[in-house]
Image (spheres, helix red, strand yellow):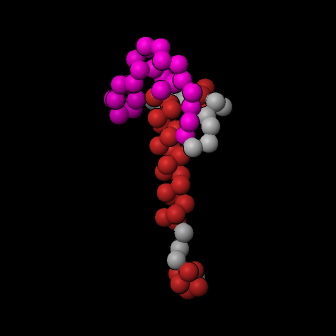
């Protein structure tokens, strides 16, 4: 399980998280290995930020669809 709650308060807008480079290998839920937990979470947050922006665009209805409702 990816428990990145300890890093969420350090997370910056745009998916940025400053991490150290210590070598403490950890695997994410998909089995991919990361150098340490912070770097794993940084990648997770970046993906979440990218998906969040895309999701907003996909959920918007075109103007013609809004008027039909």
Q: Residue at x 62, y 37 (%)?
A: 12
Q: Is residue 11 visible?
A: yes
13 to the left or right of 50 = right
Q: Is residue 33 magenta?
A: yes
- The x and y percentages for residue 38 are 51, 24
Which quarter shows the C terminus?
bottom right
Is residue 67 left or right of 41 when viewed as pictured?
Answer: right
Q: Is residue 40 above or below residue 67?
A: above
For the N terminus, the image quarter is: top left
Residue appearing at x 50%, y 40% in the figure: 46
- Tell me the magenta residue range: 15-39
Residue at point 47%, 26% (across, down): 39
Query: Eyeballing the image, is 34 above or below 53?
Result: above
Report if residue 5 is visible in the image: no
* Residue 58 or residue 5, whichever sits in front: 58
Is residue 21 a member of the stretch shown in magenta?
yes
Q: Which residue is at the far left? A: 31
Residue 4 pos. (x, y %): 54, 30
User: Against 36, is 10 above or below?
Assistant: below
Residue 34 in the image, given as x and y percentages of width and height: 39, 24
Residue at figure coordinates x 52%, y 81% from the top left: 65
Give the prevailing secondary structure in the magenta stretch. Answer: loop
Answer above or below: position of 52 versus 2: below
Q: Residue furthest top?
A: 23
């Amino acid at each position: 399980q990816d428990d990145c709650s300890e890093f969420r308060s350090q997370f910056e807008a745009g998916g940025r998280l400053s991490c150290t480079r210590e070598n403490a290998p950890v695997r994410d839920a998909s089995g991919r290995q990361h150098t340490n937990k912070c770097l794993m979470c940084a990648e997770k947050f970046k993906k979440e930020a990218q998906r969040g922006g895309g999701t907003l665009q996909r959920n918007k209805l075109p103007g013609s669809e809004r008027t039909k409702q």
